[in-house]
């Protein structure tokens, strides 16, 4: 409501506040689900008798603290290793944390097209994989010779500990750094092939999708993540899960020229606001097709974005943003 009433004016503040809310929900739901499992099965222990710690990690927009209207909450539940619980009704650590995630999914309920839709598909093997992932399974899957696709390793750029054991979460972040920042260079060819597939399958005909069309938000994010992977080995400042901060770090490190920095920063800000406005105008997260310029809906969109009735200015800014993203991507990737 504060955002709708223009009481939040600084770009990024709305995303940060929405991310704060999501993190409170995630941690509260985890604790609610954890307690009855501990009472029934006892505390999970490793084979050596030490406590088996866990970490709930965010990815995607949540990992970058960049949530917008109706963004997915992408999570991965990680635990330390094999063992069993110490209660009279003993089960394996794998079963214990599987139960935790199952209970978590039932506890957090959201409208299909509403705010905070839960997404656990970024775990190893996606829907076919275990809901809870051991440290060993994580390392094997995302290792340089593991079965993970390049885009899956790329997604780990956004991984961030949210709740659970902070020390274990930090250890998993360090492992992530070793896997993606000390491995092969970013596979730009695989990225381009995947983007072409996304456009073919997900963008309708000759329409413009604010997120998925060439020059859209996904191209900005993939470009930034690719540069982070390529240059993050030597420069830890580039290892930010937040796109806006990563763009700033790429500029300060000399990877983005002052001109490209300003263009990319402006395009990212514009397209994030555009997508939020589209979701507000339509009331759902799925349809991010930009309406025709001569339509009433485009005029509503212009007003929501602060253009009043100046639809031509919005059209020109949109075209300039797309052009700048495509030119910078071609130059750097």
Image (cartoon, helix red, strand yellow):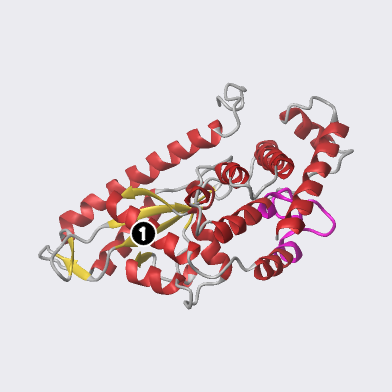
Q: Is residue 205 magenta?
A: yes
Is residue 121 at all visible to an observer of this figure? no
Instruction: Name the foreground residue: 223 vs 252.
Output: 252
Write down the region rendered in magenta. Answer: 198-219
Looking at the picture, how far across and down is residue 16, in whole percent?
50, 36
Q: Is residue 26 magenta?
A: no
Q: Is residue 68 left or right of residue 99?
A: right
Which residue occupies 44% across, 41% down?
22
Looking at the picture, how far across and down is residue 149, in whole percent?
55, 72
Secondary structure of the magenta portion, mostly? loop
Please identify the quarter of the rendering in which residue 48 is found.
bottom left
Marks counted in the figure total 1
Point out the image quarter for the N terminus.
top right
- For residue 190, above or below residue 103: below
Badge 1: how crowded within 10 Å, few (<14), some, or many (20+)? many
Please identify the quarter of the rendering in which residue 193 is found.
bottom right
Please identify the quarter of the rendering in which residue 98 is found.
bottom left
Instruction: Name the foreground residue: 183 vs 101.
Output: 183
Q: Is residue 286 left or right of residue 156?
A: right
Is residue 313 at all visible to an observer of this figure? yes
Per the image, label 1 sits on a secondary structure element best described as helix
Point out the image quarter for the C terminus.
bottom right
Q: Which residue is mark 1?
A: 172
């Amino acid at each position: 409501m504060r955002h709708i009433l223009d009481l939040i004016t600084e770009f990024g503040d709305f995303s940060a506040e929405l991310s704060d809310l999501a993190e409170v929900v995630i941690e509260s739901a985890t604790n609610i689900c954890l307690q009855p499992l501990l009472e029934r099965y006892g505390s999970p222990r490793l084979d050596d008798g030490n406590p088996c710690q866990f970490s709930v990690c965010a990815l995607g927009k949540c990992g970058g603290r960049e949530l917008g209207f109706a963004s997915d909450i992408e999570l991965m539940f990680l635990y330390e290793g094999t063992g069993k619980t110490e209660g009279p009704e003993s089960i394996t650590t794998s079963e214990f944390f599987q139960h935790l995630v199952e209970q978590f999914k039932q506890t957090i309920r959201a409208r299909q097209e509403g705010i905070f839709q839960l997404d656990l598909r970024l775990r190893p093997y996606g829907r076919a994989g275990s809901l809870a992932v051991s440290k060993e399974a994580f390392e094997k899957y995302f290792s340089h010779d593991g079965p993970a696709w390049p885009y899956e390793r790329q997604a780990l750029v956004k991984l961030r500990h949210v709740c659970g054991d902070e020390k274990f979460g930090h250890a998993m972040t360090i492992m992530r750094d070793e896997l993606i920042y000390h491995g092969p260079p970013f596979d730009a060819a695989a990225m381009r092939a995947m983007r072409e597939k996304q456009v073919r399958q997900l963008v309708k005909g000759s329409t413009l999708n604010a997120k998925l069309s060439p020059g859209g938000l996904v191209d900005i994010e993939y470009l930034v993540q690719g540069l982070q992977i390529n240059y993050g080995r030597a420069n830890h400042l580039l290892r930010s899960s937040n796109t806006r901060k990563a763009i700033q770090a790429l500029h300060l490190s000399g990877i983005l020229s002052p001109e490209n920095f300003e263009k990319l920063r402006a395009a990212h800000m514009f397209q994030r606001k555009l997508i939020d406005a589209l979701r507000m105008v339509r009331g759902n997260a799925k349809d991010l097709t930009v309406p025709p310029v001569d339509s009433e809906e485009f005029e509503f969109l212009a007003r929501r974005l602060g253009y009043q009735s100046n639809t031509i200015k919005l059209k020109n800014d949109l075209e300039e943003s797309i052009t700048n993203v495509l030119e910078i991507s071609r130059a750097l990737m």
